[in-house]
Image (cartoon, helix red, strand yellow):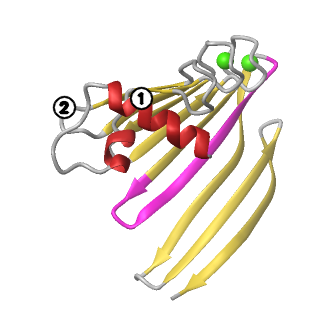
Amino acid sequence: MTKIFFLLLVVLAFSSFGQAGETLTDLSSKLANVDTDGDGKTDLWRSFSPTGDLKEAKYDLNGDGKEDKWVLYGVGNTRKEADTNFDGVKDERETKLYNDDGMIKSTLEKLNQNKWEVVEEVEVKRSGQKAQKFLVKKFSAGKLIEEKLLDTIID
Ligand SMILES: [Ca+2]
Ligand SMILES: [Ca+2]
């Protein structure tokens, strides 16, 4: 951790980023290209909107220099895609939908014999502002195999 922090300091010292009053955390969160594991190679590429909002993040999870996880940040949604076995083909994707109260639904899909299948859905249902119910549906070969209330939170 100390090593990564030191590298970050070095990167920041020689980068063109930096405006008066910004903290280190602010600066590191705005770096477009990041070497998260400190091996000298970029493994996280990010792009931001003109207003500074994170729009897209791409990751190299196995250190081969090629992207294998992509996350798109939209308005009220995020979409993640991944090549989990690093064969160059995306095989997992997840969509999350949000409203002002937080996440309302997430859907996880996996590629199975060249077909996308929904394997899990999570729905967050709210009753007023106090109760949250997390409903999980699991699928196998396109069929619903389990449906349960995962959790109930009463504030
Ligand atoms: Ca990779
Ligand atoms: Ca793959």
Q: Which residue is mark 1?
A: 11
Mark 1 is surrounded, within 10 Å at the Cα level, by few (under 14), some (14 to 19) or many (20 or more) other residues, namely some
Q: Tag 2, which secondary structure?
A: loop
In percent of the image, x 63 and y 21: which residue is there? Answer: 68
Q: Amino acid at mark 2?
A: Pro
In percent of the image, x 68 and y 13: which residue is there? Answer: 64
18 horizontally vs 118: left or right = left
Label 2 beta carbon less than 8 Å to ligand 1: no
Q: Which residue is mark 2?
A: 50
Q: Main secondary structure of the magenta part?
A: strand
Inter-mark Cα distance, 2 to 1 = 23 Å
4 horizontally vs 143: left or right = left
In percent of the image, x 74 and y 26: which residue is there? Answer: 84
- Magenta span covers which residues? 98-113
Please tell me which residue lies in front, 119 or 25. Answer: 25
79 horizontally vs 31: left or right = right
Across and down, in percent, residue 5 comes to: 52, 43
Nearer-N-terminus badge (2/1):
1
Whether residue 110 appears in magenta in the rendering, the answer is yes
Whether residue 90 appears in magenta in the rendering, the answer is no
Q: Amino acid at mark 1?
A: Val
Across and down, in percent, residue 119 comes to: 74, 42
131 horizontally vs 12: left or right = right
Across and down, in percent, residue 126 comes to: 48, 74
Q: Tag 1, which secondary structure?
A: helix
